[in-house]
Each structure stands twice: as structure tokens, then as C-alpha cells.
Image: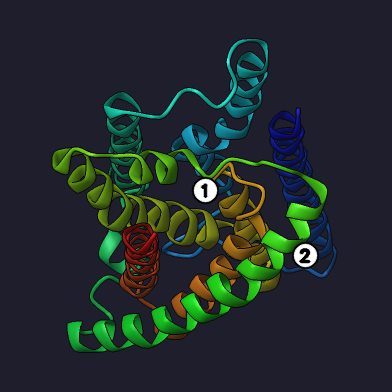
Amino acid sequence: MEELAAKHVLLDIEIITLIALAIGVALYAVIRRQSGNPISSTPHWDVYDLGLMFFPAIMFLMGPFLLVSAAGTEQESAPGDATPGYGALLFNLGIYVFVLMMVHAIVEWIRLRSMKEVFGLTRVGLPQIIIYTIVGGIFSVLVCVWLVGTFSEYWIGGMFDGLQEQAPVRSLQEAESRTFISLAVFAAVIGAPVAEEFLFRGYMYGALKNATGRLFATVVISLLFAVVHGNLPALLPLFVFSLILCAAYEMSGSLWVPVGLHAFFNGTNIVLMLTQQAVE
């Protein structure tokens, strides 16, 4: 029952966030129209992107709905017995490929724009990206894992007992095959950072910021980013991590910087998890 209740909380947060997104966009549009400054159409963004951005996002946004359904089914059968295997891993990899292809298709083919220009892919050199990745990655781990993460586990643990880890985390913890571990690490360190950053920080954040503002877009995108990962104890750490990723994108002007931070963050968490398992 605790697991099902936690999934319902995540679903409620997603629904509220989407409603807030719609209301916020409408209010900003009214305010801008009254001030004689309607939503701007730039070489990179216009009002149509607010609708198009949901097409690649649908696979992620459906996650909380599916998790509630799956959690309810597990309550009726044998809760906690199923461990995600190759099927779930390949499915996740397929989602990452689908999302990346959809973002590319919308930006390049439908909107006739250059992803290099829209996302600033050539704005920062490789040495700077590496420096930003290391410094920002260490900061993100210290803040999100050890500070916010510890607080979140204590706080959420006091309200919900026995919550499971995220499915990809559980599958990696219980994996014995080196092939499976390699694929899981690839998905976490390469697949997820690239697909999620091009969607959330790249397309959705850019479109929403153009229609509303930097602060509103940062908060809404960070909530959606956190909730679609489907784990209540990780909600607050991932929200704060997303705030850091948005700030890194704004400061650098290149999407490769948040991609690097995301990859460093996931890779470090995997190393810490596997090291802890080896010690135990």
C-alpha cells in the first residue's frame, strides 16, 4: 500500500505541474498582450513549440500513470518480486532513442532549424565542457546526493515505509551478468543524459522560457524532470539537480554542459552504489 500511495503522490504532482504550466502560459500571454509585448517569435522559438514539445515528452510524461497502474497490479499479486531485466532495459534504451529522434525531427525537419544553433552545441569548446562537467558534477553530487538526498530519505522515510528503489537502480543492484551491467551503465551514463537533456533542458525549457520567463520555466521543467523518474524519495534531490542543470545551461549557453553534468552525476552514483555493495 505504501508503494502505491507514493506513486499516486508522484502522479498528483505531475498533474498539478501540468495544470500550472497551462495556467502560467495563459497568464503570461494575457499580461504580455496587455502590455503590448506578445509572446515573441525568435529564430529559435515561437508559440507553436509549446504544443510540439509534448510529442517527444509523452513517453516520459506517461511514466507516472503507468507506474500507478503497475503498482496497483503488484498489490494484487506478489509485490516486490519482479526485478527489471533485459526487456525493461532495452525498452528504456528504445525510449531514449525515440525521444532524441523526435526532438531532432521537430527541430530540424518540422521547424527547419539547426540543433547546433538552437542548443548552442558549438558554443563551448571541449576543454571548457570537461572543466564545467567536473566542477559542476562534484558540486551536484555533494548537494543533491549527500545533502538534499539524505534529508529527503529521512523525511520521506518517516511518511512511507519500505519504498523500493527506482527500477533501473534495482536491476543494476541485482544484476550478475556483465553484459547487462554494461548495457545498464551505458543507458545511465550516455543514453539518459543525452535524451533527457535534449528534451527537458533543450527543447522544453527553451520553448517554455520564451513563452513565460526563466524562473517559471526552470521550476516547471525541474518538477517534471524529477517526477517522471518515478521515485518519491528521489523527487527532491532530482528537482534540485534539475535547477543546477538549468543554471549550467544558462551560464554556459551550451547544452553539452548539462549533458556532461548529468552523465557525471549518474556515473558517480553508480560507482558509489557498486562500491557500497562490494563493501557490504
SS of the residue under disc 2: helix
* Quadrant occupied by the C terminus: bottom left
The amino acid type found where label 2 is placed reads Arg
User: Which of the pair 155/185 is nearer the observer?
Assistant: 155
The amino acid type found where label 1 is placed reads Asp
Closer to the observer: label 1 or label 2? 1
Q: CA distance from mark 1 to mark 2?
A: 18 Å
Query: Mark 1 = which residue?
Result: 49
> Please, is residue 207 above or below residue 37 in the view?
above
Tell me, yes or no, if residue 110 can be seen here: no
Q: Residue at x 38, y 67 (%)?
A: 272
Q: Residue at x 40, y 78 (%)?
A: 137
> What x and y, as percent, mark residue 267?
32, 64
Residue found at the very far front of the displayed protein:
280
> Please, is residue 215 above or below residue 273 in the view?
below
> Please, is residue 197 above or below residue 228 in the view?
below
* Quadrant occupied by the N terminus: top right
Q: Earlier in the sequence, mark 1 or mark 2?
A: 2
> Please, is residue 168 above or below residue 270 in the view?
above
The answer to which image quadrant residue 7 occupies is: top right
Residue found at the very far top of the displayed protein:
77
Tell me, yes or no, if residue 11 can be seen here: yes
SS of the residue under disc 1: helix
User: Which of the pair 160/46 is nearer the observer?
Assistant: 160
Query: Mark 2 = which residue?
Result: 32
Q: Residue at x 50, y 38 (%)?
A: 60
Residue found at the very far left of the displayed protein:
179
Residue 223 badge: none
Disc 1 packing (10 Å; few <14; some 14–19; many ≥20) = many
